Amino acid sequence: MSQVGKLGYVDSKLGAPSSGQQTTRILFNTIETPGTTSSLSFFKNFQGLTQGQTNLTQNKLDSMESMVIKTIWLANVNTSGTLLRFGGSAQQTLSIIVGNQTVVKNLPIQFNQGEVAQAFDRLHENAGADADGIFSGTNLIQTNMPIEIRLLTDIVIPPQVAFEVRVESNAGVYGTGAVVCALAGYGKIFSAGSSF
């Protein structure tokens, strides 16, 4: 079944309207001053977060919206905004829960964790940087990169179903800045049209 077909199938089973605008979606959520911890839960707490820290107000999409997750992005920054190695050197796993079902379970993220711009999947190889970088030969390269994981299966977030992303580790060091999780893919949004 195609990705668009799967999204339409899930929407129809849940009684969501078939009309709506197909679009690219990015959902993101920030946790401020996480410190050293063994567990992070993204898309659970929205209290006190500003528009630049999240683009949701609850951990579910509106009744006429849905999404297919294609990429997961994780970043760790210090208080001055410099990218850090996500969770220090601790081994970490990621799980995605949609409704009451775990749809991605204990995915090890260290294989996609780039340092000195050498991510496992080469998405960010030799990324240029004006700050946060080191001089290596003639190229300025960023020393730490965000984690970007491309999913091989379609993870659907249906309308009005709660979801969260959990990162678990053995005492991951996230510091006093912030950690960010973003889910990117495509989906359907309500489009009222040009006349109301």
Image (cartoon, rainbow, N blue to C red):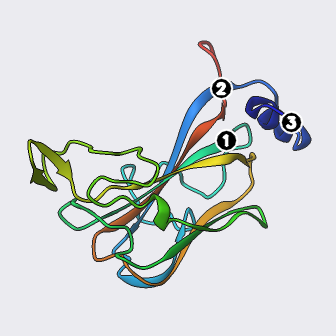
The amino acid type of the residue labelled 1 equals Met
Q: Are dots 3 and 2 in contact, CB under 8 Å?
A: no
Classify mark 3: helix, strand or loop: helix
Front-lying residue, 137 or 11: 137
Q: Are marks 2 and 1 in contact (CB under 8 Å)?
A: no
- Mark drawn on residue 67: 1
In the picture, residue 30 is in which quadrant? bottom left
Provide the residue designation for mark 3: 9
Cβ atoms under marks 1 and 3 closer than 8 Å:
no
Residue at (8, 42) in percent of width and height:
138
Does 179 sit above or below residue 20? below
Local packing at callout 2 (Cα closer than 10 Å; few below 14, some 14-19, many 20+) is: some
Residue under the point 35% across and 81% down: 35
**x and y percent of residue 60 in the render?**
66, 54
Where residue 153 appears, as percent x and y from the top left, is 71, 47
In the current view of this chain or complex, which residue is farthest to the top? 195
Exactly how many numbered labels are in the figure?
A: 3
Residue 101 x, y percent position in the rendering: 79, 65
Residue drawn at (37%, 77%), measured in percent from left and top? 89
What crowding class fits label 1: few (fewer than 14 Cα within 10 Å), some (14-19), or many (20 or more)? many
Q: Amino acid at mark 2?
A: Gln
What label does residue 29 carry, if any?
none
Sooner in the amino-acid sequence: mark 1 or mark 3: 3
Q: Secondary structure at mark 2?
A: strand
Give neighbour class at mark 3: few <14, some 14-19, many 20+ (Cα, 10 Å).
some
Q: Considering depth in this image, is 172 or 58 the residue closer to the camera?
A: 172
Q: Judge left or right: residue 126 versus residue 148.
A: left
- Please, what is the three-letter code of the amino acid marked with disc 3? Tyr
Identify the residue position indicated by label 2 in the image.
22
**68 relative to 181, above or below:** above
Name the spot of residue 6 as percent of width and height, x first. Answer: 81, 37
Q: State the quadrant of the C terminus.
A: top right
